[in-house]
Amino acid sequence: MTTKDRILARIRRAASGPDAEIPRDYLRVHGDRTPAESADLLAANLTEYRAKVHRTDEDGLSTLLMLLLAEHGSRTVLVPPALPPHWLAAADPTRVHDRAVSTPAELDGIDSVVTGCALAIAETGTIVLDGGPDQGRRRITLIPDHHICVVRVPDQLVDSVPQALERLDPTRPLTWISGPSATSDIELDRVEGVHGPRTLEVILLGAQ
């Protein structure tokens, strides 16, 4: 059997209907970790992708957000509709609320956006957004140049992609983020901020 025959056979099997048996014999997770070890792995992979990782507890979150926004020089911060108000209680920047009528040009003028997330994946260093009330619409995390994302650990942390897929709703607008937006040309010159935030900061809330 040629490679072409094998590919066509797989396509026929996949298209044979919803009752077709799909093999699920791959590993669901690579290793046995404690929640602390999973948080460490997530932090290491995010850092490898050039994201900035911070850790704090609930009491320190507002102060940390204030410091990160001040360090970035942010004068305005975009706020999803259900972001907990106490998160930004200590912050100085002007709050800009997510509105359907906001134009891309208006969003491009915002200095920072602060959101929650749906979950995070330790093995791949990935943050997943699903447009929930504490995250807002997809475009508010793609246009501003600085994104601060809060991950509740261990509640929103899984080890692997298969575990993530079991918890995500496939009908929602899922955005998978592994580090700041980046691309490279044929000479491998890296350019950040081409199709998303140039700076991604992740706060592991509850992970000390």
Image (cartoon, grey):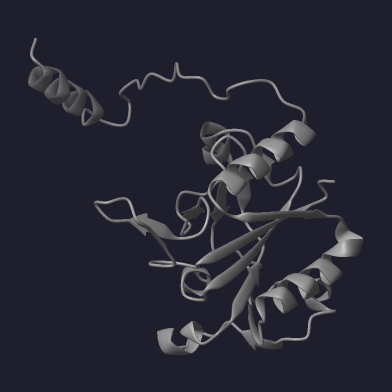
Q: Residue at x 61, y 74 (%)?
A: 113
Instruction: Pinpoint residue 150: horizontal percent, then vertical percent.
Output: 70, 59
Which image quarter: residue 132? bottom right
In the rendered image, residue 64, in percent from the top left (x then y), is placed at 81, 67
**Tag count in the figure?**
0
Q: Is residue 208 visible?
A: yes
On screen, residue 121 above or below 195: above
Q: Is residue 143 left or right of residue 168?
A: left
| Quarter of image, res 9 | top left
Identify the residue at horizontal 61%, vertical 77% (top origin): 112
In terms of image quadrants, where is residue 125? top right
Left or right of 32 on screen, residue 161: left
In this view, 146 is above or below 22: below
- As rendered, which of 138 and 200 lies closer to the eye? 200
Residue toward you, 206 or 13: 206
Residue lying farthest to the top in this orientation: 1
33 and 180: which is toward the camera:
180
Q: Identify which residue is drawn at 64% across, 41% down.
A: 44
Eyeballing the image, is 18 above or below 66? above
Q: Can residue 136 be seen in this view?
A: no
| Residue 27 point in image, percent of width and height | 51, 20
The quadrant of the picture occupied by the N terminus is top left
